[in-house]
Amino acid sequence: MFGIFQLPEETIRPDFKKFMRDHIASALNKGVILPWTELSQILPEGEDQISAQYYYDILIGENIFKNLFLTKSFCEFYFHGPGKVRYLDILGKKEATTFEIDEESWQLWLEILAIKYKQNWNCETPFVSFRAEINGHPYRFSLLHHQATSSPYSTLIVRNLQLTTLSLNAFGEAPHLEKLIKQKKNVLICGGTGSGKTSLINSLLSHCSEEEHLVVLEDTQEIILPHTFCTRFLAHEHPSYSLEHFLTYSLRLSPDRIVLGEIRSKEVVSYLLAMNTGHKGVLTTIHSNSALEGLYRLQMLFGLYGKGMEMSQTMNLICQNIDCVIYIENKKIKEIIKPLGQENGFPFFETLFQS
């Protein structure tokens, strides 16, 4: 019995697969995915056209994802190389799985994926992230070129995006979450990759007033807009602009609430200054391993990009403007703290919840 994507070895020879890859790669160099109708015309006589088309469909088509995604309940898939594929299930456990893209086809398969979704991905632009729909469901695809790493294989990470929001009760026993939205608190959500940060933002936003003008800023589309009066900026669609640019523009749009998908670099400056000029109800996420570490990470990033402000001044700015910090792990809220102030760059806070 063959694996889900495995070709019968006797039906297609390695040199025949190489012949097909070479012609497909030649077309890709011109930015074109070679149609099967053209490739089938130049196949050597006597070769099995059915097996050839099957191999072509694996490289070009989406069935390889459709079959895999339909059989797994997952948060993320990790394609690290041939024989190195696993997924994070909805309970937070990582499981290995079978995936039969062979070593010789791996890089070409990913390059085809990038071209299909109009991504400029190469050794000079080694990382791209984009939204794609498979089976009518949205996913975030992130490609990392092997030239930027020590691995011989390029990597693909697929995030399963939500179509609907979860009840706030789904995140555990943390109290008064809805009040954070109703009272327009500035909230920082912390956690690791796949911890549920964006899911929590979606659930919190579902409780905001329909009268509010929301301005949402993201790299790729993940946040679910809760109502009609929303403006969304997507940085990946405008490579010459960054989240920092869009955050600056958003302040001119009379937002009632600003939602910044994730803080990673220099957008931290505009984020903190926006709150410092009176904007309320600001929601954002940051990668960290605790609520307190989230404050220190903001401090570090602002120190890198904030033009030399002292650490104590930076932490003072953070504690004055962030009303609460939520730490989430495996889709459950573990900790909520309220920053109260700082001394010599070290914050002091009240713990509102801890599980």
Image (cartoon, helix red, strand yellow):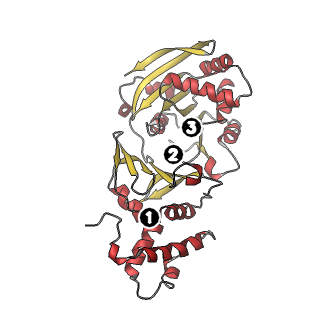
> Looking at the picture, how far across and down is residue 156, in whole percent?
49, 53
> Looking at the picture, how far across and down is residue 55, in whole percent?
42, 72
Residue found at the far right of this picture: 307
- Label 2: few (<14), some (14–19) or many (≥20) C-alpha neighbours in 10 Å: many
- Where residue 62 is drawn, which disc sits there? 1
Q: Secondary structure at mark 3?
A: loop
Q: Nearer the viewer, mark 3 or mark 2?
A: 3
> Looking at the picture, how far across and down is residue 276, in whole percent?
67, 24
Identify the residue at image location x=51%, y=24%.
325
Q: Secondary structure at mark 1?
A: loop
Query: In the visual, does 173 lie left or right of 308?
Result: left
Reply above or below: 63 against 92: below
Alpha carbon separation for disc pair 3 and 2: 11 Å
- Label 1: few (<14), some (14–19) or many (≥20) C-alpha neighbours in 10 Å: some
Alpha carbon separation for disc pair 1 and 3: 29 Å
Visible in this render: residue 273?
no
- Where residue 262 is drawn, which disc sits there? 3
Q: Nearer the viewer, residue 272 or 78?
A: 78
Asked which quadrant contains residue 81, the reply is bottom left
Q: Nearer the viewer, residue 168 or 220?
A: 220
Q: Nearer the viewer, residue 309 or 170?
A: 309
The three-letter amino acid code for the residue at tag 2 is Glu
Reply above or below: 353 against 30: above
- Where residue 257 is drawn, which disc sits there? none
Residue at image mark 2: 222
The three-letter amino acid code for the residue at tag 3 is Glu
Q: Nearer the viewer, mark 1 or mark 2?
A: 1
Identify the residue at image location x=45%, y=35%.
200
Sequence-first disc among 1 and 3? 1
> Looking at the picture, how far across and down is residue 309, in whole percent?
72, 22
Residue found at the far top of this picture: 343
